[in-house]
Each structure stands twice: as C-alpha cells, then as structure tokens.
Amino acid sequence: MSESFQAWSAYFELNADHLLSIDWEGEGPLRLEEIDWIFTSIRQFQRAFQTDGRQLLNGAHQYFEGKDADTYLTALGHYISEKRRHASLLERFMVQKRIPKLSIHWLDTLFRGTRRTVGYGQGMAILGVAEVIAQVYFEALKYATDSRILARVCDQILWDSTQHGHFMGCSLEFVGAENERKKQRLLRYQRRLLRLAQPVLWWLHYEVLKASGFTYKRFRQACQEGLEQLYAFELEDLQERMIEMAGKEEQEKMPPLAQL
C-alpha cells in the first residue's frame, strides 16, 4: 500500500507542474440570468474548498499513530494543496465577476462539524461523497454560462477531481486494509450518505444543474456512477495519466511504476 501512495505523491507533484493555461483577459461580465444561476452555488463550493487542511491532517496523524503511514500522509498533504488551489481559482473568477465570497455557510459548517465528530474512516467516506458531488456539479457549471474562463476553470477542477475521487477510494481501502468488516461498514455508510445528500444538493444547486440540462434522475444517476468509479482504479491508470501529462523528455526520466 505504501508504494501506491508514493505513486500518488509523484502524480500530485507532476500535476502541479502541468496545469491548464487560463486566459483571464478579454471577457465581459456575465449575463444577469447567468449570475442568478451560479451566484449562490459557486460561492458555496469556493467556501468548501477553502481549507488549510489542519483538521484532516491532524485526524490522519492521530488515526495512524504508531503505524507506517508516512507515504500516505505526504500524499494527503498534496491532495489538500490541490483543493486549496481550486479555491483560489474560483476566488479569482468570482473577484473578476464581482461575486463576493462567503465567510460561512450552514452546509459547510455541518460538513466540517460532522467530520470532527465521526471517526477518521467515516470522515474519509464523507470526503469521498463530496468528491462525487463536486465532479457532477463542475460538469454542470462548465456549461451553465457562456464564460470561457469559467469553463476552463471547471476543466482544471474536473481533471483534478477525477483523481481526487480515486485518492479517496484508495484512502478508504487503506483505512480498512486490516479489517474487511470495517471496510464494508464504511462503504455502506458512504452509500447511505450519498442517498441522503442527493436531494439536499439538488435543492441547493438546482439552478446550475437545470441550466446545464440535468434532471433529478440524471443527477442521481451521475452521482451513483461517480461513487462506483471511486473504486474502479488501478495503479497502472495513474501511471498512464502521468505519461499523458508529461512530455517526451519527462517520460524518459519517469521511473517505472514499480519504483514509484
């Protein structure tokens, strides 16, 4: 398992050096109806991504105390850095379009508070559900307006979030590695949580989802497919993604998967 998280750290480091280019100039304001569609929901996601990661890292250190988890903790730090980068991208777009940030939101407060009160495994299950929802939301947000800048920001977040979901899946596998019954309980907990979250998230982000052509049935189906994809992952997939990002010169320097 430690080898897989070494691979994750190598991926996160490579990904940070191969971000999509975004031309932030030459775009006018959003239309009034576009602002109405995204105003509330984009602020909620920007707030959710804005974290220093201390709670998550502290929980991981306490949970794995005395165990060989250094490679996992390093990879987790990279994951947190990417979430913060997403918050910065959304904030820059919001500033440009004169959309004010949220200092607090009840769902974000509930989300963070719940993670503090449950065990680390359940907390990671919650984060996995959040990654599933985020992937569906940003797929919708990409097409909710005519803004090429926002579409490009969504492309970057979607590129990253696909792997974030897989990282959450690997994390839950790691947490439950020594106890199959515990692992199955976490998976059941995650499925129940997603079922409970779907109507709430649909209600909160209805305008964006509707503007992009989502129905509630399609939204639920996309969430379910996303949850299944969390665990449809092999290390070879990560290696292929790294090769896709890297140029020929970097590929020649890249160590074989077995050495990552």
Image (cartoon, rainbow, N blue to C red):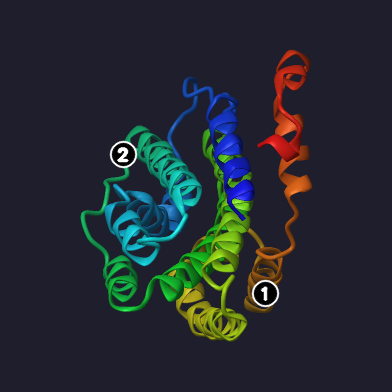
Question: Would residue 248 be seen by someone viewing this image from the given angle?
Answer: yes
Q: Which residue is denoted by mark 2 in the rendering?
A: 98
Residue 15 in picture, x, y percent from top left: 58, 32
Q: Residue 251: percent from the left, percent from the top?
A: 75, 22
Q: Residues within 10 Å of mark 2 (few under 14, many from 20)?
A: few
Nearer the observer: mark 2 or 1; the answer is: 1
Q: Mark 1: which secondary structure?
A: helix
Q: Is residue 92 above or below residue 66?
A: above
Q: Nearer the viewer, residue 173 or 13?
A: 173
- The total of numbered circles placed on residues is 2
Label 2 and label 1: CA atoms lie apart by 35 Å
Please, what is the three-letter code of the amino acid marked with disc 2? Arg
Q: Dot 1: within a 10 Å radius of its alpha carbon, few (fewer than 14), some, or many (20 or more) residues? A: some
- Quarter of the rendering occupied by the C terminus: top right
Give the residue drawn at x 27%, y 48%: 101
Of the numbered discs in the image, which one, if any, rests on residue 224? 1
- Which quarter shows the N terminus? bottom right
Residue pictured at 55% horizontal, 73% vertical: 176
* Residue 238 point in image, percent of width and height: 71, 44
Q: Is 233 situated left or right of 145 in this image?
A: right
From this viewpoint, is residue 142 visible?
Answer: no
Q: Earlier in the sequence, mark 2 or mark 1?
A: 2
| Identity, as a three-letter code, of the amino acid under mark 1 | Gln
- The structure residue drawn at horizontal position 40% and vertical position 55%, both measured from the top left corner, is 45
State which quadrant residue 85 falls in.
top left
Q: Do the residues labelled 2 and 1 touch (CB within 8 Å)?
A: no
Q: Is mark 2 on a helix, strand or loop?
A: loop
